[in-house]
Amino acid sequence: MSTERLELPEPSQAVLRAARALLRRKERKATGRFLAEGPQAVREALKVPNAVESVFFRWGAVHDHVDLLDAARAADVPHYAVSEQNLITVSDTVTPQGVVAVCRTVDVALADALADDPQLVVICAQIRDPGNAGTVIRCADAFGADAVILSSDSVEVYNPKTVRASVGSIFHLPLVEGVDLAEAIDACRAAGLQVFATDGESGTELTDLTDRLAQPTAWVMGNESWGLPTEHLQLADTTVAVPIYGAAESLNLATAAAVCLYASASAQHTASD
């Protein structure tokens, strides 16, 4: 590839200021825009029609991301080269990964997320840590879930740490934000899903559900520190504990989500063969 082809324009100060403002939740909500940082997140975003508004490359990293530059050009997405200093101002990391995209929000309405006969859904209830939320979204994507729903008291999907932890998965499956937990559970049940809620104190373990795991299921995952309160556990059809055979006191949220989703996905795929 020629050096001439890699000559990129520099953004105006107004364009940089608008991107920089998206580090604040208020601006993300007001504009319907957010930042996706890192090659994988930007790569996946560019695969979604009209999801990307612009892409910023660090001057010294353009040659490392030629595929992303080609994808941006093919999608007719404005793309710019910026200094390391300017890239830092549109990133919430100490050492940016060389490319940041301004994206349009991708969440959908609850009814739309559950419209097409869902088989596996994750409901995040009061999940406050953005890294955990992003990892749960990534796990849901990996195990073929049909949607992820975040309750109104959970962290924002578009928090930069959530986006980064999802490693591009937020662009792969329907996401619903800001829904009352009871409303989300009712909607899942109306869509034909049984509702399981994780609870380390439950008398029912995951291994006890062999005959039920293949059925369409919504998993409710609770807060990192205190799990699900009693009133939320009572909304589910069944509470479920992940059995622990070693000396660890418990599993963290993302690990528990991965185990439960793997169990459901494996049972559903086996049943469909």
Image (tube, rainbow, N blue to C red):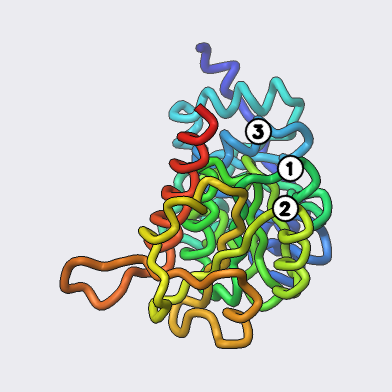
Q: Nearer the viewer, mark 1 or mark 2?
A: 2
The residue labelled by disc 2 is 192
Q: Residue at x 67, y 55 (%)?
A: 193
Quick one: 182 or 29, which is closer to the camera?
Answer: 182
Residues under labels 1 and 3: Cα distance?
27 Å
The residue labelled by disc 1 is 117
Residue 121 is situated, as x and y percent measured from the top left of the image, at 62, 53
Q: Residue at x 76, y 48 (%)?
A: 104
13 vs 238, left or right, is right
Residues under labels 2 and 3: Cα distance?
33 Å
Q: What amino acid is labelled 1 in the image?
A: Asp
Residue 252 is situated, as x and y percent measured from the top left of the image, at 36, 69
Q: What amino acid is labelled 2 in the image?
A: Gly
- Please, is residue 153 above or below residue 101 in the view? below
User: Which comes before the other along the chain, label 2 or label 3?
Assistant: 3
Specify the quadrant of the image occupied by residue 77.
Answer: top right
User: Which comes before the other along the chain, label 1 or label 2?
Assistant: 1
